[in-house]
Image (spheres, rainbow, N blue to C red):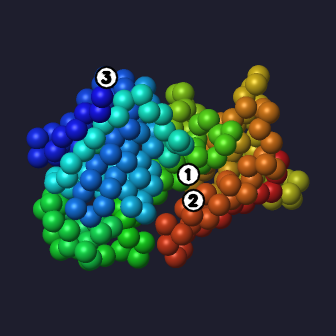
């Protein structure tokens, strides 16, 4: 039997916490004045979210802005696909941080529906608007890149570091700080090795260990890597990886140098 209620009695933050702590598999449907949001839980994690034209983590951040609406929870319904890869606690902390900073005026309001002046929205300063709409530009662009890489079929882990190995973002990576330093070292050494042979710098490398392989990409101002099975062919996922880097370049704006550099070594 579905559970129905009102956000005035139980806030979205609390609903998410209850379902995740209870390790539920369920579909949450929320009817807001501006439209409907749907979140799916799988074994206690938020795995899919949609709010009007927004998908994934952006949809959750947008849904957190509103405190008026009715909801319905249907248990035992699995998500049709996966669009969210972050841990639920991190999602809530980041979402509430963005809202708090908007309310304090430290960052512009980035409500995707600000032009409609919806009711039932958490108070925030007047919106200045953004070129893209939504909330992506308030986020760590490296985290968004990791999210996009994780959506590629066959990719089971992703990490982004600076060239000195400083960790920027990761998902499903064991010992990410150590791995970040390792891939930065490999890229640095690859660059040194290429100088005597006049073959250029290392732009892509593959490290194989047992049945796993790590594909490393030197993006000049940062380094990214994906973890996958040795059965995954780079030629198959290459278009999707390249698309993720192109999207990252667009998010970084003019001057960003994040195009996929694909010279293999």
**Rounded to the nearest whole Å, what is the CA distance between mark 1 and mark 2?**
19 Å
Q: Is residue 102 left or right of residue 21?
A: left
Work out whether residue 57 can be spotted.
no
Of marks 2 and 3, the one in the foreground:
3
Residue at the location (58% across, 46% down)?
151
Do callouts 2 and 3 mark residues in contact (Cβ within 8 Å)?
Answer: no
Q: Residue at x 52, y 28 (%)?
A: 175
Which label belongs to residue 148?
Answer: 1
Out of 108 and 115, give the one closest to the viewer.
115
**Closer to the observer: label 1 or label 2?**
1
Which residue is identified by label 2?
221
Residue 233 vertical position relative to residue 197 in the rendered view, above or below: above
Secondary element at tag 3: loop
Residue 196 shows in this picture = yes
Q: Residue furthest right?
A: 197
State the CA–CA distance, disc 3 to disc 1.
Answer: 28 Å
């Amino acid at each position: 039997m579905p559970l129905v209620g009102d956000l005035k009695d139980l806030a979205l933050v609390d609903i998410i916490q209850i379902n995740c702590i209870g390790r539920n598999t369920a579909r949450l449907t929320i009817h807001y004045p501006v439209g409907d949001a749907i979140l799916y839980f799988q074994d206690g994690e938020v795995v899919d979210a949609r709010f009007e034209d927004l998908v994934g983590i952006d949809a959750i951040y947008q849904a957190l802005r509103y405190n008026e609406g009715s909801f319905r929870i249907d248990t035992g319904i699995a998500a049709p696909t996966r669009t969210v890869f972050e841990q639920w606690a991190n999602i809530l902390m980041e979402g509430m941080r963005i809202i708090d900073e908007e309310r304090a005026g430290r960052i512009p309001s980035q409500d995707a529906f600000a032009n409609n002046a919806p009711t039932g929205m958490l108070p925030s300063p007047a919106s200045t608007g953004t070129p893209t709409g939504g909330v992506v530009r308030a986020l760590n662009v490296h985290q968004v890149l990791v999210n996009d890489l994780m959506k590629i079929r066959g990719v089971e882990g992703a990490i982004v570091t600076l060239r000195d190995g400083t960790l920027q973002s990761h998902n499903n990576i064991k010992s990410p700080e150590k791995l970040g330093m390792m891939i930065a070292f490999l890229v640095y050494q690859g660059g040194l090795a290429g100088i005597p042979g006049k073959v250029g710098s290392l732009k892509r490398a593959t490290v194989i260990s047992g049945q796993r392989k790590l594909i490393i990409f030197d993006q000049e101002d940062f380094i990214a890597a994906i973890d996958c099975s040795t059965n995954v062919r780079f030629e198959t996922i290459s278009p999707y990886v390249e698309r993720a880097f192109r999207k990252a370049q667009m998010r970084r704006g003019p001057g960003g140098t994040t195009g996929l550099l694909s010279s293999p070594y």
